[in-house]
DNA sequence: ACCTGAACACCGTTCAAGT
DNA sequence: ACCTGAACACCGTTCAAGT
């Protein structure tokens, strides 16, 4: 029974796991190195043994968030939903993945899944469509997720514009299917005559 | 010739203008209240006379960035390009507009322009398509703009994955036209027989 | 191999007080 | 009407030193 005056001992994985839990509790804006260190009962400087910078730690979190996306099998719409739901699984997940993806840290696991599904569906320009789809999913998820939290903390206007994000699921499905090439040209306003 | 020991006197507009210039010079990450105050030869606390918080100031900048978008006239593709180019006109413009749009500050000038163009084009579901288009444009522009800056400062890998953002203009055009309903179902892999 | 302690150069925001 | 000065409670990061 050594009284252990040095109780805190971690590796890269336990730091990342705790940081990810903390992200989900407090959000990206409040995810500081000092807070993470506090939860680990460790001085902030200790984190720099495991990660070279906060940016590197965030990239690791983004990778973990996107790691659960299934790479093959289903069709484009289901793949896109899988990505969206992976981003939604953690608070500010979409924003985090969007920023670190832009810095081309974080292997583009999500984009691979999309292009693969597009190819299986017979798309000839799967690379371009996959990129466009990823941009849409990331933009959509970021917007929706931030608004979800803003709304739940009720800090905002009492619904002045009624449908800026109305029917979010329908917007998502329409966007994905249009980008996948599954949508007919004009949504039946005037059927082509002749 | 009063020697004026109190040279710095500003209003809301001059603060916003200077902040916008500084944004373009240093980027969003380095746009601190203290830096803005420094450029105005003023104490940081002086800014809080003109803006209640940094968030409010950023929302004003986002509004100014999107204000130049033409509201009516051209078709969907040109409208979308106008939005993208307005975002590109200032460093980190896309990221800034994306975050403040999510907080539903910043009237959705851009979305109005898109739905209007969609309606003029005959779309029956212009609201949903307009939302999807905005999400795509914001996601795309944020990703591209951040990567542009990362590349120009050469901090990154020597092109390991060759086409993660290859043909960005083509990806943008394809995405916009697909979402606008201008694209035939599958890009001519097998023409419909019958 | 992993952590402490102290330091450096920063943050956003508040508030009494000045002019 | 607009600003100062000082303070409060924070940041990310470095680095010698400990175990």
Image (spheres, coloured by chain):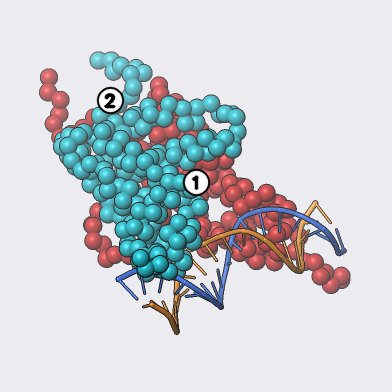
Chain colours: A cyan, B red, C blue, D orange
Q: Which residue is mark 1?
A: B99
Secondary structure category for the residue under label 1? helix
> Residue B183 placed where, x, y %?
28, 32
> Residue D4 placed where, x, y %?
76, 66
Q: Is residue B122 visible?
A: no
Q: Residue at x 57, y 40 (%)?
A: B105
Secondary structure category for the residue under label 2? loop
Q: Residue at x 25, y 15 (%)?
A: A194
Q: Which residue is mark 2?
A: A184
Do marks 2 and 1 both belong to one polypeptide chain? no
Q: Residue at x 35, y 53 (%)?
A: A17
Q: Residue at x 37, y 59 (%)?
A: A15
Q: How many marks?
A: 2
How far apart marks 2 and 1 lie (CA) works out to 32 Å
> Which quarter of the picture shows residue B182?
top left
> Which quarter of the picture shows residue B80?
top left
């Amino acid at each position: 029974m050594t009284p252990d005056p040095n109780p805190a001992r971690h590796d890269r994985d336990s730091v990342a796991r705790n940081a990810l839990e903390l992200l989900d509790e407090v959000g990206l804006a409040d995810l500081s190195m000092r807070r993470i260190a506090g939860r680990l009962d460790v001085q902030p400087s200790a984190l720099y043994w495991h990660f070279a910078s906060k940016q590197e730690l965030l990239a690791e979190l983004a990778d973990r968030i996107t790691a659960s996306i299934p790479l093959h099998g289903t069709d484009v719409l289901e793949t896109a939903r899988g990505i969206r739901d992976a981003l939604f699984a953690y608070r500010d997940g979409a924003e985090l993945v969007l920023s670190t993806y832009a810095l081309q840290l974080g292997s583009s696991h999500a984009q691979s899944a999309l292009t693969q599904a597009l190819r299986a569906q017979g798309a000839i320009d799967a690379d371009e469509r996959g990129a466009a789809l990823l941009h849409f999913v990331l933009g959509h998820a970021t917007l929706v997720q931030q608004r979800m939290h803003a709304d739940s903390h009720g800090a905002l206007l009492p619904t002045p514009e009624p449908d800026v994000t109305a029917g979010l699921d329908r917007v998502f499905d329409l966007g994905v299917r249009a980008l996948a090439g599954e949508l007919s040209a004009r949504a039946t306003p005037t059927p082509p005559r002749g």
